[in-house]
Image (cartoon, helix red, strand yellow):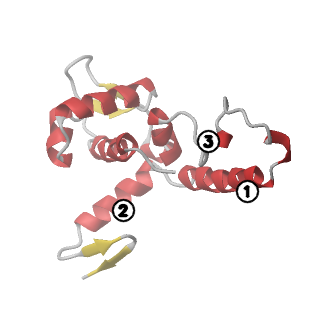
Amino acid sequence: MKITTKTRYGLRAMVEIARETGRDGILQKEISLRQKLSNKYLDQIILALKSANLILNVHGKKSGYILARPADSITLLDIHQAFEPAFHMVDCLAPNYVCEKENKCSSKLFWQGLNNVVIDYFKSFTLQQILDKQTELESMPNLSCTNIVCEK
């Protein structure tokens, strides 16, 4: 299982949008600059986030973006599902997948269990938590982070 680039960049864009609490929101070109993403690729990401009702334009087209609901009510699963509606670790968990061993496969039970753990993990984090961690990391000078470990 691999998390798509759109999901990863979508989360980064959502963090930028969540930072902007002003009435005018944040312009797409500002997100593009801050995150070093091409504006053309960001178009696709923004469209998916809007279609999933996670963000909206403040004043219509060509205006800034704001969150459609509070950051503490948007989970990472919500963001992931803007890009990949179904979450399945292996093909046999996909809704339209047909397998002759469907009803007598102990492996499928294992994969379904793992799939549920991953879904629960995505549900357990909110955009607000990610934003808070980002703010904390940015406030610490001379910090080097690899994975979860940060050192001065």
SS class of the residue under badge 2? helix
Q: Nearer the viewer, residue 97 or 64?
A: 97
Q: Which residue is mark 3?
A: 91
Q: Position of residue 71 (x, y in %)?
A: 43, 44
Decide: is 20 above or below 62.
Answer: below
Q: Position of residue 151 (x, y in %)?
A: 29, 81
SS class of the residue under badge 1? helix
Q: Residue 48 appears in which quarter of the rendering?
A: top left
Depth-wise, is mark 3 or mark 1 nearer the camera? Answer: 3
Give the alpha-carbon distance from disc 1 to disc 2, as whole Å: 33 Å
Query: Can residue 152 be seen in the rendering of this structure?
Result: yes
Say whether residue 47 is left or right of residue 62: right
Decide: is 9 above or below 56.
Answer: below
At 64% from the left and 36% from the top, the residue drawn is 94
Q: Nearer the viewer, residue 13 or 45?
A: 45
Give the alpha-carbon distance from disc 3 to disc 1, as whole Å: 13 Å
* Residue 133, numbered circle: 2
At 32% from the left and 44% from the top, the residue drawn is 9
Q: Nearer the viewer, residue 151 or 39?
A: 39
Q: Position of residue 88 (x, y in %)?
A: 60, 44
Q: Residues within 10 Å of mark 1 (few under 14, many from 20)?
A: few
Q: Amino acid at mark 3?
A: Asp
Q: Residues within 10 Å of mark 2 (few under 14, many from 20)?
A: few
Decide: is 46 above or below 104.
Answer: above
Q: Amino acid at mark 2?
A: Lys
Q: Amino acid at mark 1?
A: Phe
Q: Residue 42 appears in which quarter of the rendering?
A: top left
Which comes before the other along the chain, label 3 or label 1? 3
